[in-house]
């Protein structure tokens, strides 16, 4: 295919030379982000992120792995994720039973307070409920009854933890200080306390008009707090990439490694929402003020970026913008490519992102040092 056709295809928004590989990488990055958010990289069936059916994607990887059609590299990358499992239901059950055995051995009973392990507490309740309705799996029933202190009826112990607003505010400040974001999912604990559940309760009371004015002021003073969860996350990730641009000067993320995968996924979500017309204009304006922000993902420019890197390396190595006609770098005639970029620029058909990247190259000029009619250097006046 000619360079002209390749360049024209690269100009198409969303164009990719490897859509299957790109989709796999998107699924992997979203699974990684899911694991960082919830503590385990096992998105459930039905989970979707911006229209991407992440739960179904994860299950398809398990099917490919079972059939032997998943590459070794991809299998190893998935296995490197905390909490990933090829048999999620079985592995999760075994993990919960192990934690229940450990708790019973230490405490002499199986009545888990929510302050100790909220997920395990809910699991024990579900098992007892299913046993009472005769819907509990027989094999699981036998495993539970092998625990010495197991009983099918809970004791009369009452959860010692009650809604304590002053403690909630204190923990909320501590959470923001330690993690940078004042939010947890409903089932998450913080320092042994069910802070996630408390935050859900607080928001419900706020929107019902049931919160004391002084308590509202205390909570709203927490950095990054927003009564709408989505706004809390948006502010957190925006501030994260703000810090990144202050440190590096721009958002050339593919050439850095210290921006979290969650933030990279968040950036891609903002681009998708913008294309769909669902991104608030005020948020779009904030993003566009970031140095180097682009609505076009750099990953879509990968063939272009390869030639860009070759030109950049040549000019920095030779300390000149003069590329001899027909000169090859890695088998590619970069002099022709440079001439084509200059022509697109003259015709105003080069994207702002590409213009910005080219102008970052030392020695780059938009005027050719050659007289195009005879291939000789143009005389300077």
Image (spheres, rainbow, N blue to C red):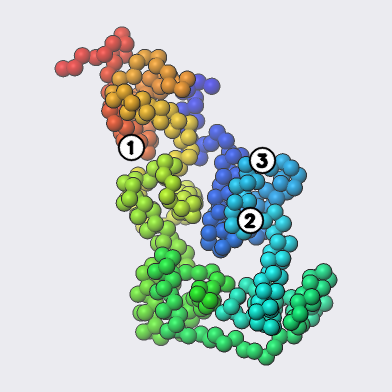
**Image position, residue 107 (x, y; %):** 65, 82
Q: Secondary structure at mark 2?
A: loop
| Numbered tag placed on residue 71 in the rendering | 3
Give the residue displayed 48% in from the left and 85% down from the top: 164
For this orientation, the residue located farthest to the top is 374
What is the spatial separation of the Cα atoms under label 3 and label 2, in whole angstroms? 16 Å
Q: Using the image, determine if residue 26 lies above or below residue 202.
A: above
Choose top left, top right, bottom left or bottom right for residue 218. Answer: bottom left
**Image position, residue 231 (x, y; %):** 43, 64
- In screen coordinates, is 150 left or right of 214? right
* Label 3 or label 1, whichever comes before in sequence order: 3
Residue pointed to by mark 1 = 356
* Label 3 or label 2, whichever comes before in sequence order: 3
Q: Is residue 346 visible?
A: no
Q: Residues within 10 Å of mark 2 (few under 14, many from 20)?
A: some
For this orientation, the residue located farthest to the bottom is 156
Q: Quadrant of the C terminus?
A: top left
Residue pointed to by mark 2 = 84
* Label 2 or label 1, whichever comes before in sequence order: 2
């Amino acid at each position: 295919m000619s360079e002209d056709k390749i360049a024209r295809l690269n100009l198409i928004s969303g164009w990719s030379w490897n859509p299957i590989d790109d989709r796999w990488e998107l699924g992997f990055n979203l699974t990684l982000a899911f694991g960082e958010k919830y503590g385990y990289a096992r998105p459930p069936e039905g989970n979707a992120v911006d229209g991407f059916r992440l739960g179904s994607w994860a299950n398809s990887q398990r099917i490919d792995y079972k059939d032997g059609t998943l590459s070794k590299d991809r299998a190893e990358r998935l296995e490197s994720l905390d909490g990933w499992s090829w048999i999620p239901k079985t592995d999760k059950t075994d993990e919960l039973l192990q934690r229940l055995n450990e708790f019973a051995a230490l405490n002499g009973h199986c009545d888990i307070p929510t302050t100790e392990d909220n997920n395990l507490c809910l699991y024990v309740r579900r098992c007892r409920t299913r046993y009472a309705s005769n819907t509990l799996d027989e094999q699981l029933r036998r495993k539970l009854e092998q625990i010495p202190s197991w009983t099918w009826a809970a004791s009369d112990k009452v959860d010692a933890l009650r809604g304590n607003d002053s403690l909630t505010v204190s923990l909320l400040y501590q959470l923001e200080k330690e993690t940078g974001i004042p939010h947890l999912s409903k089932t998450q604990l913080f320092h042994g306390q069910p802070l996630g559940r408390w935050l859900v309760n607080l928001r419900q009371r706020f929107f019902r008009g049931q919160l004391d004015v002084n308590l509202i002021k205390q909570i709203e003073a927490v950095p990054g707090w927003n009564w709408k969860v989505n706004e809390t996350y948006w502010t957190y990730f925006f501030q994260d990439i703000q810090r990144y641009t202050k440190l590096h000067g721009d958002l050339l993320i593919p050439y850095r490694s210290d921006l979290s995968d969650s933030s990279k996924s968040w950036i891609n979500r903002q681009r998708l929402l913008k294309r769909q017309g669902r991104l608030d204009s005020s948020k779009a304006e904030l993003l566009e003020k970031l140095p180097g922000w682009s609505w076009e993902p750099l990953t879509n420019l990968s063939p272009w970026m390869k030639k860009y890197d070759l030109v950049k390396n040549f000019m920095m190595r030779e300390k000149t913008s003069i590329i001899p006609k027909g000169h090859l770098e890695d088998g590619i005639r970069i002099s022709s490519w440079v001439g084509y970029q200059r022509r697109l620029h003259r015709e105003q058909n080069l994207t702002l992102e590409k213009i910005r990247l080219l102008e970052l190259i030392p020695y780059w000029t938009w005027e050719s040092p050659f007289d195009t009619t005879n291939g000789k250097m143009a005389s300077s006046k």
